[in-house]
Image (spheres, coloured by chain):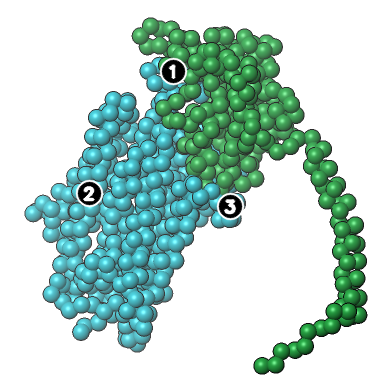
Chain colours: A cyan, B green
Amino acid sequence: MKRVRFQEIQGRGAGYRAVLGVLALLILGGLGAAYYMEHFGHAVTGMNNRIVWGTPHVFAVFLIVAASGALNAASVSSVFGRTPYQPLARLSGLLAVALLSGGLMVLVLDLGRPDRLIVALTSYNFKSIFAWNIYLYMGFFAVVGAYLWVMMERRMNRFAKPVGWFAFLWRLVLTTGTGSIFGFLVARQAYDAAIMAPLFIAMSLAFGHAILILVLMLACHCAERPLGDALVRRLKNLLGVFVAAVLYFVAVQHLTNLYAAEHHGFERFILAEGGIHTVLFWGGQVVLGGLVPLALLFHPATGGRRGAVGLAAGLVVLGGLAQVYVIIIGGQAYPLVLFPGMEPGSGFLDGAIASYAPSLPELALGISGVAIALMMVALGVKVLPFLPRTLADAPAGPDAPPADTGTGAEAARATEPA
Amino acid sequence: MKMPPSPPANNTVDGARRRLLAGAAAIATLSLAPGVVLITAAEAKAPTGPASAKVRWGLLVDSAKCGDGCDVCVDACRTENGWTGHGRPRTDPQWIRMVSLREPAGGASWTLPMMCQHCRFPPCVDVCPTGASFRRADGIVLVDKHICIGCRYCMMACPYNARSFVHEDVAEQRPHAPRGKGTVESCTLCVHRIDAGGIPACVEACGRAGGGALTFGDLNDPDSEIARRAAAYAAVRVRADLGLDPAVRYHIPGRAAKR
């Protein structure tokens, strides 16, 4: 049986160092922004008493949702027994941990009192989905960490399947929890719906898978590791299914709202009259993040091309950010209905659409979360054997013998780096 | 196996031990008892006991008595609790605000104050991850500023936009209403006054300089003025459809709830 050989990347070139340097600068920028926000208060951001969650939450929720989805490749191989995905399982686990770390860092640094993180970890209200999520996030690190260990330690390989199953179930619960942060908000027109949980699961599958494709293409390109067309084709088809699933849940969500007269105001806002939110919904989320990627992935003229797959994955990421923006900011911008049927007004903007413009510190903090995730991946593949030596079609093809989840690290280390 | 012989009944060592133990118990009782008695006495004499679930403090707003442009209650709250703003309405705190309502068809309009509704089933308390948002036994919903981490999830959950996030440094705090940058705050129903046997500042000010639109009292006491008036007016609970049973009730003439 042919064993998949994993190997650290060399990481000695100027390009690699430049990437680390840029990421470090972005992270420093985010930390500086967080300090600025905490020192002067959130008044220096675009957030206010109506838009209480701003751009940092858009990035944080996007990264946390994507983290769960980044585990797809590992789940597909361990849980569903698709051997061609096995060489990707380790990278998939690393990316999942990295994305969650980035998202949580942004979430914590956007707190009004990030210095009280210890309170969040020691004082719990178990009726709060937020409190559950703290356990789900911490547990995700532990579960995926264990999963990576049993995959990378040859003596533990036999546990890869049960641990993989556990990680798969855990991440479904985790994303259910993240979606329910919004689903459990009883008072808001935009939320308060059970569909938020499955919608978020579909989003996680699409966003995380798209990021995995991009990271994989980039890593293979930079480390000069072969990446076979058959594997790319598999990844692309899976991405297409996930993107379609997101569109399906979004359609169901809005059709259900359109059926109920009480939600017509909110739907009119998002779908037709919401300015930037309407533009982001149709242009960003549906067209650029959904329909165009589907066309790129499945049209005979582009479907087989690697560039088109990469472009589609990039668009899914951008469309995903647009979607989370519309969910979080759009959902808050639409006013709470205190007195149905009456026209309210006040100095506190009752009954009015709340305006919001992302500020530079918020953007810097949000982007630093992405940078943290990418930095962890870049360092991870250098210090531990996460990347296979080759992903060329022969070992990754559908007819190939089952790849070993074992590391072969010792063997790989003994050989010359690629 | 051979059992050991049982000790003689009049064992002198045992008798001595018994006397020693009895003496020790007497000494312990004598030294601890005064402390126990004192603690009990101290609790009995505490100026305020723990909040009692027998009462449910509430407010009744008679919007018919709310004059156009009157914001005496808002000013009184601001002065009492020290939440003066910086002239930035979008980020300034707003514990209580005046809301105007207009009937789209008839054009009739009302004005009323909106603040924390002190729900029996408060969504802010449900969602708070650390338990900083809590509801006292007497129904007052508060924020423990010491364990609020500033996540603002309660503000997402509140149906009434009643909570504010402290966006900037605070100055001139009142000792009875501690505030903190980076935490969430809202109407406390002037809990410091209630615990001292008083009434909320807004109610007092409205009675003195406003239209007397606010009634404060115990909703659990059927003979209280608030309970009688709330029943007589068929006072409405805002967003009654959510089933949160707020302790602030509104009399909006012509908009009485159907019973």
Q: Secondary structure at mark 3?
A: loop
Nearer the observer, B132 or A216: B132
Give amino acid for label 1: Arg
Pick whichever of labels 3 and 2 is earlier in the sequence. Answer: 3
- Identify the residue at image location x=25%, y=44%: A249
Q: Which residue is mark 1?
A: B259
Q: CA distance from mark 1 to mark 3?
A: 42 Å
Label 1 crowd (10 A; few <14 / some 14-19 / many >=20):
few
- Identify the residue at image location x=27%, y=38%: A253
Q: Image height check: is A91 above or below B62?
A: below
Visible residue check, residue A328: yes
Tell if the residue under mark 1 belongs to the same chain as the one under mark 3.
no
Q: Which residue is mark 2?
A: A245
Specify the farthest residue to the front: B9
Q: Quadrant of residue A352?
A: top left
Give amino acid for label 2: Ala
The answer to whether the residues at label 1 and label 3 have Cβ atoms under 8 Å apart is no
Left or right, A14 with respect to A233, comes to right
Left or right, B135 with respect to B123, comes to right
Tell if the residue under mark 3 belongs to the same chain as the one under mark 2.
yes
Give amino acid for label 3: Ser
Q: CA distance from mark 3 to mark 2?
A: 38 Å
Q: Position of residue A378 (x, y in %)?
A: 39, 66
Q: Which residue is mark 3?
A: A123
Q: Position of residue B130 (x, y in %)?
A: 56, 48
Q: Secondary structure at mark 1?
A: loop
The answer to whether the residues at label 1 and label 2 have Cβ atoms under 8 Å apart is no
Residue A4, disc: none
